[in-house]
Amino acid sequence: MNEPLVSVIIASYNHGPYIEASIASVLAQTYPHIELLVVDDGSSDDSVQRVRRLQALHGFDFQVQANQGLSRTLNAAIARARGGLIAPFGSDDVMLPGRIAAQVAYLADKPDVGICACGIQEIDAQGANRGQAQCHGNRRLDFEDVFLDRKKGAPAPTLLFRREALERVGGFDPAIRLEDLLIELRITRAGYFIDVLDEVLALYRVHGDNTYLNYRFMTQNILQTYAQFADHPAYETVRLRFLRSMALKCARRDKALARELLAKLPLQAWNSKAIRALLRLKFSR
């Protein structure tokens, strides 16, 4: 009862250079009751061969499938998993050895916490640290905190879910390909909290294929996510704030998208951030 089974699910897609380090970090956890499920979601690189070599040594569950997308892959793996706690984990990220043990211990007497997270340290493609560790103190997030962005969020590489919370909201939505924000909003709206520990327990790898660098993909999926909560009184405020922030972020690297986003802003929604985005568009090379 004090040491529940944790199911770690790694869905891998063309992360051959990183997948072995990701798997090894799960196998090196100090927590004793972990089942590891790895799914290759239609990779065209050498990921499958790399994983099979590790599977032959360690005997974890490994499946290879045609590309289904991350949300469908996670849902199918969760259905097969036996753990009461679920940790989806990026195939390019690394867990520090005490991560699962710390999170399980924290959740033991907190049934109202649906997701436990922690701090991260960014690393580059070769595994070297990038900048300072990202810890912002112990914090608890409810739906309003997440939807209104009132507190620092929960880093995606560190999320540990209660199975009952995932099942209560129907799992991950295959229609939304950027799954983290939507599942956090659904679980907190269902009445659970997200608690974030002030401790670095995972390494987030930054490289040329990170999803957050695909601004158009990010924009489409985040707007679709927010639209599912259009009944919230602050929905339009949240949507406009995101349009301004994203326009500023991509004004140098994706000028066409920045123009599209600024064009969606009504005149009364323009502020200093929107003006800065416009100036970047005009004067950056």
Image (cartoon, rainbow, N blue to C red):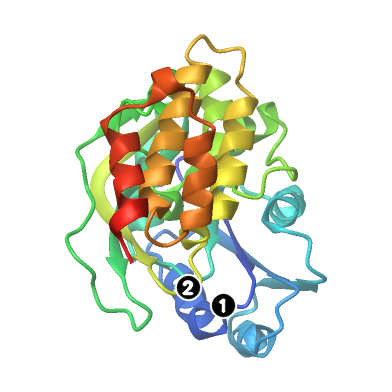
- Residue 111: horizontal and vertical position, in percent? 47, 25
Determine the CA span between mark 2 and mark 1: 10 Å
Q: Position of residue 210 (x, y in %)?
A: 48, 66
Q: Position of residue 44 (x, y in %)?
A: 71, 83
Name the secondary structure under disc 1: loop
Which is nearer the eye, 213 or 201?
213
Q: Are marks 2 and 1 in contact (CB under 8 Å)?
A: yes
Quadrant placement of the C terminus:
bottom left
* Image point (26%, 78%), residue name: 128
Q: Residues within 10 Å of mark 1 (few under 14, many from 20)?
A: many
Residue placed most toward the observer, 103 or 238: 238
Amino acid tagged 2: Ser
Q: What residue is pinned by disc 1?
A: 15
Q: Marks 2 and 1: which is nearer the front?
A: 1
Looking at the rendered structure, the secondary structure element under dot 2 is helix
Residue beneath disc 2: 22
User: Left or right: 273 with respect to 38?
Assistant: left
* In the image, residue 114 above or below residue 79: above
**What residue lies at 51% left-to-right and 24% top-to-bottom?**
188
**Count of picture labels:** 2
